[in-house]
Image (cartoon, rainbow, N blue to C red):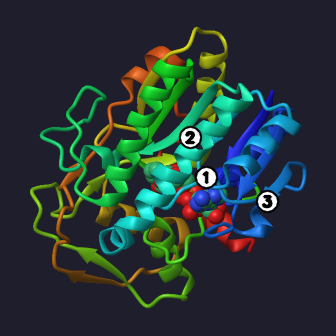
Amino acid sequence: MRIFVTGGAGYIGSVMTDVLVDRGHDVTVFDNLSRGHRDALNPRARFVEGDLVDTPHVFNTLKSNRIDAVIHMAGDALVGESMGNPARYYRNNLIAGVSLLEAMRDAGVTPIVFSSTCAVYGVPERTPLDEGMPTGPINPYGESKLAYERALEWFHRAHGLKVVALRYFNAAGAGARSGERHEPETHLIPIVLDVAAGTRPSVTIFGDDYPTRDGTCVRDYIHVLDLADAHLLALEFLRSRDPRMEIYNLGCGGDGYTIREVISCAEKVTGRPIATVTGPRRAGDPPVLVASSDKARRELGWTPTRARLDVIVESAWNWRSTR
Ligand SMILES: NC(=O)c1ccc[n+]([C@@H]2O[C@H](COP(=O)([O-])OP(=O)(O)OC[C@H]3O[C@@H](n4cnc5c(N)ncnc54)[C@H](O)[C@@H]3O)[C@@H](O)[C@H]2O)c1
C-alpha cells in the first residue's frame, strides 16, 4: 500500500515507518520536525517536511503520491505542557488534525488509523479499562485527543471515512533502528535508563503511598513493535470492510507494573544501580492504569509478542547503547 505517516520523524512514527518499509509498503512521511528528529527518518521512505495545518500542502502530497491510507501519529503529547498551554494542544492535536481530514476528504483517501491515548479516560472507576468505560479527560492533552476522536466519528458519518482509533497505554522499547527520544523526556523507562547511563542523577517516584502492591503507581507498557503490529492489522481490517469507526485499547494488560518494578527490572537489565528520590504525588495520577485489549485481540487478531517488561527494557537499553 501507499501509506502516509504523519509524525514519522517522532518516536513511534519512525518505528512504524521502519516496519512498513520492511514489509514492502511505499511510505510518505509528513512531519514538521517540531518534536521529531531528522536522523530518525527512514532513508527508504519519502520525506515531506510540512505542517498538517497547511491543508493544500497535505492535499497535494496525498494526491501526488496516490496515497491509499493514512496513519496519523503527529501531535503534541506532553501532559504537563498541555496544562500550561492548552491552546497549543487544541491547535495541533485538533485543528491541524482536522486540516488533515479535510485534505483526505478532498483527495478521496478514506482509511485512517489514529494514535489516541488512554488519557481520554482520565481517572478510571475501575481497571482493566475497556473501551466501554466512560471517558473523562483531566488534562487538555486528553481532551484534545478525545475531541479529535469525535471529529473522526463525524467525518466518518459525513464522508465515509474508515477509522480505527487506537488508544495506546505507555509505548516503550525500541525498534532495530529507532527508539524513544522526547525533549523534554517525561516517560519513565528512558528516564530510568538515563540514570543507569549516568546522564541523570536520579529518578523521582511521585508518591509511594498508593493502594498498590508496593505503594507506587501501576502502569501498562506496550512494546513499540507490538504497537506497530496493531497498526498493520488495523490497516488490513479497514481495507477489507465498509466504512466504519472502531476504537481499540492497546496495552499488555495483566497486572501491569509498578514504578518500583520498572526500576528494579532496569537495574537487572543494565547491571547498574538506579538512584531514586521519593516526591509527593502528582495531581491527577490514577493509582492504576491497565488496559483490557480483549477487543483488539478479538477483532483485529492482535497478540502482543513482546509483552514482558524485561524484553521491553532490554530493547530500549540496547538501542540507547548504540547511539
Ligand atoms: N509515546 C507514548 O507512550 C504515547 C502514548 C499514547 C499516545 N501517543 C500518541 O502517539 C503519537 C506519537 O507519539 P510519540 O511519542 O512518537 O511522539 P513524538 O513527539 O516523538 O512524535 C510526534 C511527531 O509529530 C510531529 N508533529 C507534531 N505536530 C505536527 C504537525 N502539526 N505537523 C506535522 N508534524 C507534526 C513531530 O515533529 C514529531 O516528529 C502522538 O500522537 C501521541 O499523542 C503516544
Cβ atoms under marks 2 and 1 closer than 8 Å: yes
Amino acid type at circle 2 is: Leu
* Residue, disc 2: 227
Residue 41 is marked as: 3
Cβ atoms under marks 1 and 3 closer than 8 Å: no
- Residue 10 in percent (x, y) is at 64, 60
Q: Quadrant of residue 135?
A: top left
What residue sits 40% from the left and 47% below the top? 145
Quarter holding the C terminus? bottom right
Where's ligand 1: which quadrant?
bottom right
Say whether residue 319 is visible. Answer: yes
In the rendered image, the vertical position of residue 24 relative to residue 180, given as above or below: above
Few, some or many residues within 10 Å of mark 2 (<14, 14–19, 20+): many
In the rendered image, the vertical position of residue 133 relative to residue 59, given as above or below: above
In front of the other: 204 or 318: 204
What residue sits 59% from the left and 37% below the top? 101
Amino acid type at circle 1 is: Ile
Few, some or many residues within 10 Å of mark 1 (<14, 14–19, 20+): many
Amino acid type at circle 3 is: Leu
Say whether residue 313 is visible. Answer: no
What residue sits 47% from the left and 36% below the top? 166
* Residue, disc 1: 12
Give the alpha-carbon distance from disc 3 to disc 2, as whole Å: 18 Å
Mark 1 Cβ and ligand 1 under 8 Å apart: yes
In the rendered image, the vertical position of residue 322 relative to residue 315, given as above or below: below
In front of the other: 99 or 79: 99
First in residue order: circle 2 vs circle 1: 1
- Residue 274 in percent (x, y) is at 41, 80
Give the alpha-carbon distance from disc 1 to disc 3, as whole Å: 11 Å
- Residue 128 in percent (x, y) is at 24, 35
SS assignment at label 1: helix
